[in-house]
Image: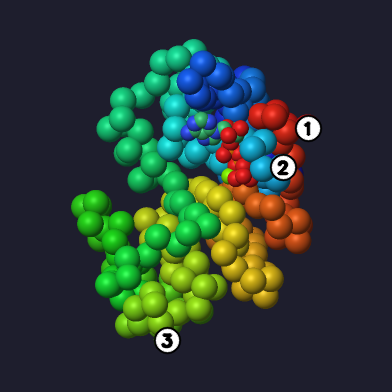
Amino acid sequence: MPENRVIIETEKITKIYHRGAEQVKAIDELSIAVREGDFLAIVGPSGSGKTTLLNLLGCLDNPGGGRLAVDGRKIHENGHGLSESQLTRIRRQLFGYIFQKFYLIPTLTVLENVLVPFTFFKKPRAEEDVISLLKKLGLENRTGHLPGELSGGEMQRVAIARALVNRPKVLLADEPTGNLDSERSREIGRVLRRLNEEEGLTILLVTHNLELAGLAKATITLRDGRIV
Ligand SMILES: Nc1ncnc2c1ncn2[C@@H]1O[C@H](COP(=O)(O)OP(=O)(O)OP(=O)(O)O)[C@@H](O)[C@H]1O
Ligand SMILES: [Mg+2]
């Protein structure tokens, strides 16, 4: 079978944080290729660079050096990158993001929360499409609820729906089950797996939870900003 197209590619990207006089090499000349349809778990000890890597791959942060290409476009090369507005466009077109904290707006209903990205978009998706997305995530009976009336697992599924409402090619998830108990974590894991298998969604998942990582198709382990 031919391999799928590479959607994110890095060559020796580096990210150095400066803390006073001290330098922290959070990502150290890391090269990786992510293909469409991949479901990749990123694991490693605290401080190994997982969040930093995910933010670089998702164009939320600029590398200090190396090369980053996304969807065939050069994003960064040797200290030079796209403008902030070009990056913003790529983030909106290509990526959906979910985090450990769900970042739902407490005064908006489930449906309204999921529609929030359209505040920034010109082409609104038909309401029945959004309802069918909510159905797929088991939220069809929660559309009028406020976040405070939901379980943690439901809140994270709302956040997933919001991340998917613009049909991103890649879903980036940083510790999405960090605030959930093991049964809720499994439920989120099954949702991600299904989105990958049935919709071909490319997923990059940072997690400490090895059971969750086991649901991915492949795992990389980071240590000191390198793949080990
Ligand atoms: N804004 C920042 N300023 C300075 N140093 C930072 C900053 N963000 C991260 N670091 C440092 O970079 C390294 C990698 O951090 P990162 O957050 O990527 O780790 P992580 O693997 O996601 O850890 P965790 O599992 O605890 O979330 C750490 O040494 C961290 O202290
Ligand atoms: Mg982290």
Where residue 210 appears, as percent x and y from the top left, is 75, 56
Towards the viewer: 29 or 148: 148
Q: Residue furthest front?
A: 20
According to the picture, the residue beneath numbered tag 1 turns out to be: 228
According to the picture, the residue beneath numbered tag 3 turns out to be: 141
| CA distance for labels 1 and 3 | 44 Å
Task: Categorize mark 2 by other alpha carbons within 10 Å: few (<14), some (14-19), many (20+).
Answer: some
Q: Secondary structure at mark 2?
A: loop
Q: Earlier in the sequence, mark 1 or mark 2?
A: 2
**110 w.r.t. 44: above or below:** below
Which mark is in front, 1 or 3?
Answer: 1
Q: Earlier in the sequence, mark 3 or mark 2?
A: 2
Q: In this rendering, would 18 be left or right of 228?
A: left
Residue type at mark 3 is Asn
Where residue 95 appears, as percent x and y from the top left, is 44, 46
Q: Residue at x 56, y 58 (%)?
A: 176
- Image quarter in which the C terminus is found: top right
Q: Secondary structure at mark 1?
A: loop
- Marks 1/2 in contact by CB < 8 Å: the verdict is yes
Q: Earlier in the sequence, mark 1 or mark 3?
A: 3
Q: In this rendering, would 19 be left or right of 37?
A: left
Where residue 108 appears, as percent x and y from the top left, is 28, 72
Q: In this rendering, would 199 be left or right of 75?
A: right
Which mark is in front, 1 or 2?
Answer: 2
Q: Residue at x 48, y 55 (%)?
A: 98
**194 w.r.t. 201: above or below:** below
Q: Is the CB atom of the residue marked by disc 2 within 8 angstroms of ligand 1's nearest atom?
A: yes
Residue type at mark 1 is Val
Q: Quadrant of ligand 1?
A: top right
| CA distance for labels 1 and 2 | 9 Å
- Image quarter in which the N terminus is found: top right
Mark yes or no: residue 143 visible. no
